[in-house]
Each structure stands twice: as C-alpha cells, then as structure tokens.
C-alpha cells in the first residue's frame, strides 16, 4: 500500500529541519564556544530552506505521502510556512541571549526537533503518526522549558512534563480505543469505519485523543501547565511554546474534525464550541489582574485558543472554516511573537509597572507593543482583526451564532488587561526609573513582526483566497 509514494522529497521541510538538528549536534561537539552560533545559523538556513520548499510545494496537487500517513494539501503547506517562519523569529530572539553559552548548540537542536514535531502534527493523516508528532514536539520542549536550570525554569519544566506525560498517556489510550472501534489508524478509513462503530466507544476514544491535542494547543482542559511554564521559562522559549506547538496542534485538531470524525454521528461540533467558550473565558478572566507580563501573555494565549477553535467547531459546515483557521494562525503567530519580542528586548522589565515611562525612553518599542497587544484584541487593520472577523462569520455561517456572540463579548473584555499593560508606558517615569536596556535584534524583530501583522491585515483578502484548497482524503 505504501510502495508507490515513499518519496522523502514529499517531506523535504521536515527532512531539512531534522537533518540540520543532527548535523548541528555533531558540529557543536567540535566547534569552540565562540563559534557555536554557526549551529544557530544552520538552523536558520534549514528553516528558510524548508519555507521555500513548502511554498513551492503548495502549488502541487493534493496527495498523501507514505501511504495515507501524511497529507500534502493546503492545510499542511500553509502550516509549514507559518511554523517555519515563526521558528525563524524565535531563533532571532534567542541567538543574542545564547551567544557564548556552553549549551548554545543544544538549544538550537532542541528547538529544531520540537519544531519538526509541530510540522508532523500539522500533516499527520494517521493516528500513530499523530502520536509520534506529539512526542517529538513535546520531549524537546520539556528540556527547553528548563533550559536555564534555575528554580523557576526547573519548576516550569517539571509542571510541563507532568501534565504532558499524563495527557500523552490519555491520548495513546484514546488512539487504542479508536483503533479497536475502527480497526485502523488511517484517517480516510476511520471516517467510514467510525460511522458504523459503537457510539460509546467512539466517544470515549475521541475524548481521550482530544485531551492530548488540547494540551499541545494550550486550551481547556489541557491548559494547566501554561501560566507557570511560560512565566518560568526564558522569554524566547515562552515565545516558542505559545506559538509553534499551538499551530501544529490546531491544524491537527481541524484535520481530525474534518476527516475521521466528520461522519461519526456524535455532537463533536457542540463539544468543540464548549471548549472554545471555556478557553476564551477562562483565559480572559485569569489575565485581568496579572502583573507579570509573561504570565499575562500566557493567559492571553489560552484565550486565543478559544477564538481559534471557532473555525474548528464548524469544520465541514461552511466554506470559511479552513481559510479562517490558517489565516488566523498566521496573524496570531506574527502578533504574539511581536509582543514577546518586546519582552525580550526589555529583558529587565518583568511586570507591568516596569514599563512605566516607556513612551519617553523607547517610543518605537512602545509603538510595536501597542500594535501587537491591540492586535491580539482584534483591532483593525491588524491580521488578527480580520482573522476574528472571519472566525465570527464562519461560526454564524456554520450555525453557531451564539458562539460568535460569546467570542465578541470576550474580545471586548480582553481589551481591559491589554490596556492595563499599555497605560503605564505613557506615564512620566519616577525618580528611580532608568531607561531599560534593550536587545537590538529583539527590537528589530518586534518592529518587523508588528509591521508584518499590519501588512498581513491589509492584504488579507489576497491571502484568504489562496487558503481554501481541498483536504487530502
């Protein structure tokens, strides 16, 4: 069955990233400490090459690779571009901090392996490959969370690992149950078999499976690790954890909803709508009075999962679902990484009050922060604004108008805690306040991400039209 399409070039972005990780590990063992940055440059080259390969492959026909295990369609191609582009931005944030670190190469290798796992999640068309992507995206990420080896980092890694291991076992249990119900792990065959399987067995297996996917996305009920892990990790790692695994997991979630579960005959759309409501509401309520900026962004990312689940809830019910999800993911990645780039640039500013007087000391950074934070709310003309608008339209078109209303109310409520962060920046600095030291590369990344978010929003119509291709079956 797999003999006709076992072409490694079909997985060229994934192969480039994995090969770069292995080669970087070998180079790191021989390069002197002051030359370890070359492994970071190699990682950046692999990400750039993978992006080019993904763009070129996007114009090809819809097909599957290695039997029906890996899908090559618009969902996979776009997810590849977003994930690899986000990885380049994370590398730009991390390299200045890591220069000369004795474990610099290890960081780049772990980052590439975890990113490869996210790519596998996005294209998986088989439950066993989905589980492999979960592990590959997870195990290196646990090490990244505790990379600094200090108290907060160790606590972050431990909580991340404990929740990930638990929900990983739950996910594997769900895969086993679905295998028993459908007698296969291939999505295309499961779509037919699950429609004839006992509904109780299908429900139990799918609930367990989705628990692992939601952990990777950082949504309710798999969100418990997010606040402590993001606060305890370094800022570049926090930027990575709130962006790249989420893209792969949500693409995987959409594919599950659109292919194997589409004809299961159970109310999965209603369940996803409830999870969406819970994620956006809990994330917003918990963020209201946060003082630590990384913790605030952690709760913000939980709420963003809720909005991103809107098109997943109506998968297959409207023609807006896939293009909405992909466009929103691209806008979210740029905007969220832009906010974290400001946090990286102002490394000593850990709380909201530390941003007091930023309008006088670093007005350009403040402008980037304002664009990104208001962008996360959904303020025009940023990309997230158009993404949310499309998500609301998809929910209404798919018969979930009440979910669009809940999302709109949560969007208005989220404005409060983003403005709480912005407001002190316009106040006069106190006598003890001094200009915050900045990282030039991180600042440049913040400027670029903020500008990219606005540009993507202005050109949204052009991009949306290109994101509606069919799924591999």
Image (cartoon, rainbow, N blue to C red):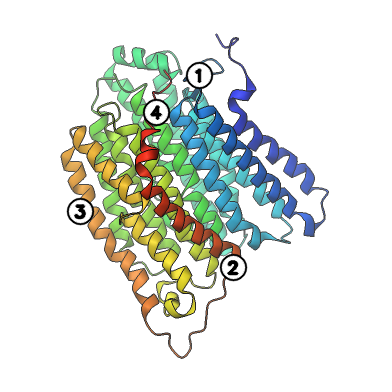
Q: Image height check: is 148 above or below 83?
A: below
Q: Which mark is residue 409?
A: 3
* Quadrant location of the C terminus in the rendered image: top left
Q: Is residue 310 visible?
A: yes
Residue 271 placement: quadrant: top left
| Sooner in the amino-acid sequence: mark 3 or mark 2 | 3
Q: Secondary structure at mark 1?
A: strand
Residue 311 point in image, percent of width and height: 30, 36
Horizontal relation, residue 415 to residue 166: left or right: left
Residue 127 point in image, percent of width and height: 47, 24
Distance in Å between CA atoms under marks 4 and 2: 39 Å
Q: Are marks 3 and 1 in contact (CB under 8 Å)?
A: no
Q: Image height check: is 207 above or below 109?
A: above
The residue pinned by badge 1 equals 64
Residue at point 45% right, 57% down? 451
Q: Residues within 10 Å of mark 2 (few under 14, many from 20)?
A: some
Distance in Å between CA atoms under marks 3 and 2: 37 Å
Q: Which mark is residue 439?
A: 2
Distance in Å between CA atoms under marks 4 and 1: 13 Å
3 vs 2, front mark: 2
Q: Are marks 4 and 1 in contact (CB under 8 Å)?
A: no
4 vs 2, front mark: 2
Residue at point 49% right, 43% down? 245
Q: Are marks 3 and 2 in contact (CB under 8 Å)?
A: no
The residue pinned by badge 4 equals 255
């Amino acid at each position: 069955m797999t003999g006709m399409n076992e072409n490694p070039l079909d997985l060229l972005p994934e192969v480039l990233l994995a090969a770069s990780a292995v080669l970087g590990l070998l180079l790191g063992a021989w390069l002197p400490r002051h030359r370890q940055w070359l492994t970071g440059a190699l990682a950046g080259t692999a990400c750039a090459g993978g992006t080019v390969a993904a763009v070129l492959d996007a114009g090809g026909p819809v097909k599957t690779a290695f039997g029906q295990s890996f899908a090559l369609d618009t969902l996979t191609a776009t997810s590849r571009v977003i994930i690899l582009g986000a990885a380049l931005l994370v590398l730009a944030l991390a390299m200045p901090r890591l220069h000369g670190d004795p474990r610099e190469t290890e960081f780049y290798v772990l980052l590439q392996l975890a990113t490869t796992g996210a790519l596998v999640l996005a294209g998986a068309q088989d439950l066993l490959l989905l589980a492999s992507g979960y592990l590959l995206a997870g195990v290196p990420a646990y090490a990244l969370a505790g990379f600094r080896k200090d108290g907060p980092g160790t606590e972050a890694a431990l909580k991340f690992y404990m929740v990930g291991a638990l929900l990983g076992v739950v996910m594997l249990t769900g895969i086993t149950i679905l295998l028993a119900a459908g007698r296969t792990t291939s999505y295309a065959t499961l779509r037919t078999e699950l429609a004839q399987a006992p509904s109780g067995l299908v429900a139990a297996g799918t609930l367990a499976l989705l628990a692992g996917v939601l952990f990777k996305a950082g949504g309710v009920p798999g969100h418990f690790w997010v606040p402590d892990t993001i606060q305890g990790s370094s800022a570049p790692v926090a930027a990575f954890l709130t962006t790249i695994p989420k893209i792969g997991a949500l693409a995987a979630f959409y594919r599950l909803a659109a292919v194997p579960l589409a004809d299961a005959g159970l109310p999965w759309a209603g369940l996803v709508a409830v999870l969406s409501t819970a994620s956006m509401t809990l994330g917003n309520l918990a963020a209201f009075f946060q003082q630590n900026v990384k913790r605030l962004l952690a709760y913000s990312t939980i709420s963003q999962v809720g909005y991103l689940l809107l098109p997943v809830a109506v998968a297959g019910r409207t023609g807006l679902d896939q293009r909405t999800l992909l466009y929103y993911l691209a806008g979210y990645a740029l905007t969220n990484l832009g906010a974290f780039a400001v946090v990286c640039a102002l490394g000593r500013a850990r709380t909201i009050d530390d941003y007091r007087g930023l309008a006088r000391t670093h007005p350009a950074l403040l402008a980037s922060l304002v664009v990104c934070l208001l962008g996360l709310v959904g303020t025009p003309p940023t990309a997230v604004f158009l993404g949310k608008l499309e998500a609301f339209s998809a929910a209404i078109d798919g018969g979930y108008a009440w979910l669009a209303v809940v999302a709109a109310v949560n969007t208005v409520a989220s404005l409060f805690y983003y403005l709480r962060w912005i407001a002190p920046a316009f106040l006069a600095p106190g006598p003890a306040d001094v200009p915050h030291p900045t990282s030039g590369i991180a600042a440049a990344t913040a400027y670029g991400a903020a500008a990219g978010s606005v540009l993507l929003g202005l050109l949204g119509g052009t991009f949306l039209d290109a994101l509606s291709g069919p799924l591999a079956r």
